[in-house]
Amino acid sequence: MTVAMTRPAPAPACTAATEVFCNPLLEEPLPSSASSAQRQARTILMARAAETCTSCPLFTKCLYDAVVNHDVYGFVAGTTVRQRHEIRTELEVTVDPDDFDTLAGVTSPNRQIDHDEVVRLRTANPHESLESIAQRLGCSLSTVKRHLRRARNGEVAPREESVPPTLEDILDVYDSVVTTSRRRAA
């Protein structure tokens, strides 16, 4: 009998350098009133963080996720918030911020209900009552009925699916953005 051994996934290099990546100087841009000592400390931290990121075996996956899938904050994948914004702008990528209220089940009055989510929930749960779908979404029964009626009548145009950039596209723009940022800082 042969037992297949699988290797555990490599750990991100940043997890071993929490003193760098969790430093407040890397999390927020420095105010214009920052002292030269703070600026120098930030520059050193950014250099250490960038070195850690670029040597990490998960660098390309982390960069792709930080640019395309998640609107993260702080220094991630060798980039600052501003650099990721520049990369997204160049590639015409839009990332919606995570909706933590919906994930936590918190609803607020007068918020927009996603039409596709109403239809998806109804399709996935055909035996569930419309009232329970409305409760799940935090909206009224009439809102659920209106969205389902619009879908049945074909009144909602399908969303255009944008093609996400390739990893090569992201790496090319990353190189130009990070190089330009370093030249400006020097």
Image: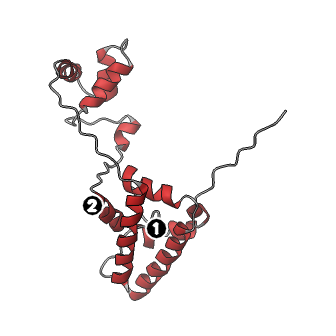
As helix, strand or loop, the secondary structure at mark 1 comes to loop
Tell me if mark 2 has few (under 14), some (14-19) or many (20+) residues whose alpha carbon lies within 10 angstroms of its own: few
- Relative vertical location of residue 102 with respect to residue 30 in this rendering, above or below: above
Say which residue appears at 56% left-offset and 65% top-offset. Answer: 18
- Image location (x, y in percent) of residue 108: 26, 36
- Relative vertical location of residue 77 with respect to residue 101 in this rendering, above or below: below
As helix, strand or loop, the secondary structure at mark 2 comes to helix
The image quadrant of residue 173 is bottom left
> Residue 180 or 37: which is nearer the viewer?
180
Say which residue appears at 51% left-offset and 71% top-offset. Answer: 49
Residue 89 bears which disc, if any? 2
Q: Earlier in the sequence, mark 2 or mark 1?
A: 1
Give, as a three-letter code, the residue at label 2.
Thr
- Examine the rendering and report whether any part of residue 71 can be seen: no
Say which residue appears at 23% left-offset and 36% top-offset. Answer: 159
- Farthest residue toward the top? 127
- Farthest residue toward the right? 1
- Image location (x, y in percent) of residue 8: 67, 49
| Whole-number angstrom distance, CA of label 2 to CA of label 1 | 17 Å
Q: Which residue is mark 1?
A: 78
- Examine the rendering and report whether any part of residue 62 can be seen: yes
> Residue 50 or 42: which is nearer the viewer?
50
- Image location (x, y in percent) of residue 146: 18, 21
> Residue 150 or 159: which is nearer the viewer?
159
